[in-house]
Amino acid sequence: MGKSSKDKRDAYYRLAKEQGWRARSAFKLLQLDEEFNLFENVTRVVDLCAAPGSWSQVLSRVLIKGETFGRRAWQDREAKLRQKMLNVFGTSAQTDDATGNQPTRAVVTEPKPRSDVKIVAIDLQPISPLPGIITLRADITHPATVPLLLKALDPDYDPSNHSQQAAQPVDLVISDGAPDVTGLHDLDIYVQSQLLFAALNLALCVLKPGGKFVAKIFRGRNVDLLYTQLKIFFDKVYVAKPRSSRASSVEAFIVCIDFRPPKGFHASLEEPLGVGNRLPEMLAERNAELPITAAPERLQDEITGAWNVAPIKPQNGPDSDGICDIEVEDLTTDPSEDIRWIAPFVACGDLSAFDSDASYKLPDDHVSLDPIQPPTAPPYKRAIELRRANGGAYKKIASSTKS
């Protein structure tokens, strides 16, 4: 299957090459920004799992160069057209009957490059340079990555001075990372959730209060637990599905807005989510602090979730003889099961945009373009080199035929 057929069956793959994006995933971030206004008042951004750099490319063109895309670009074009028409017909335009003044003209300002924006892209794979982007080849799960990141954002930061309290300087943390899928959905969802927790833990270390966090997720059976855990740290949590993301895929994006860490919370890569491996000790200390009562209570084990004491509640109160009827509740029913928080699901993108699952007829004069940025260090690079060194894929077949 060649490039032309892929251009036909994946419109966003074709548009990415035509518009100069490194990957089709750039449209996902643009559609998320169009829905949630992610880039408003943002000057410092960290892009995790950034290779090949399409999301960093969006950040460079929007935040540094000041370009607009999507609905904003259309509004700017309309405003420029109105301004041109008013400039042409301004001398002969009649005054407004109510105020006696000339009609108000739309003021359109050209995008100006910004120098106060700092963007850091991190990945284990090398990333080709981008204008205004600081690239780091590091592991987001390693404790040394946070000082390295803070040093890239603030050159005056001293990682060796542990007493120095580094300010949380980042307004937005984004992550489009995903594991190499195996086709086993339960395994893929689990590995993706661990990658998400690694990105979240690093984000908690560098985000400032009021910051935003965006990451890719795979929707699965127990994904509600993930939403609830994110709700502890962020005021608003949404699940978004851009139109450029295939509907047949379990891929979605979690959008967390307004970072509000709990009181006394201290983020660290050594102790993920502020707990690390101390969860059994914390539960034992908490149970030791619980008051001891003579009356039987309904207590739930926080590890297994089992109810260890049958709850007893009086019914109708004691009668004249002092006898009180009691009723034992059903142990199989959790009284809190009806109390459930569900993250809002938002579909991003204009309905008139291309459908990522549809195939489109290409024009007769269509020319298939090469990708903007080929893979820098793909996992199969070594295999290709060995095959070429051995004379190609069909060398053994040709030699066996001659013999």
Image (spheres, grey):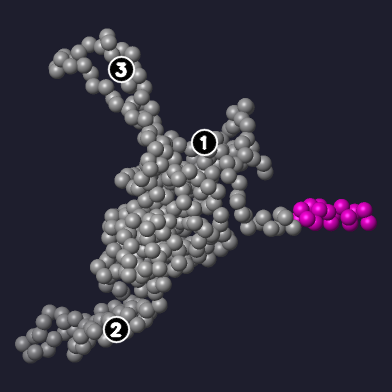
Q: Could you tell me residue 349's position as x and y percent?
A: 41, 41
Q: Going 27% across and 9% down the picture, which residue do you hit?
A: 92
Answer left or right for 383 relative to 328.
right
Q: Going 37% across and 81% down the picture, which residue do you hit?
A: 280
225, 285: nearer the viewer:
285
Give how far apart the Cα atoms at labels 3 and 1 are: 31 Å
Answer left or right for 401 relative to 381.
right
How busy is the neighbourhood of tag 2: few (under 14 within 10 Å), some, or many (20 plus)?
few
Q: Amino acid at mark 2?
A: Glu
Which region is colored magenta? 387-403
> Which label's residue is closer to the chain start, 3 or 2?
3
Question: Under tag 1, what secondary structure?
Answer: helix
Q: Which residue is mark 2?
A: 285
Q: Which residue is mark 1?
A: 19
On the rendered image, what quadrant is the C terminus found in? Answer: bottom right
> Which label's residue is closer to the chain start, 1 or 2?
1
On the rendered image, what quadrant is the N terminus found in? Answer: top right
| Of marks 1 and 2, the one in the foreground | 1
Q: Please, is residue 47 above or below residue 75 in the view?
A: below
Question: Under tag 2, what secondary structure?
Answer: helix
Q: Could you tell me residue 289's position as x and y percent?
A: 24, 84
Q: Going 38% across and 43% down the picture, which residue do you hit?
A: 115
Q: Which residue is mark 3?
A: 86
Give how far apart the Cα atoms at labels 1 and 2 are: 58 Å
Q: Is residue 336 visible?
A: yes
Q: Please, is residue 57 above or below residue 363 in the view?
A: below
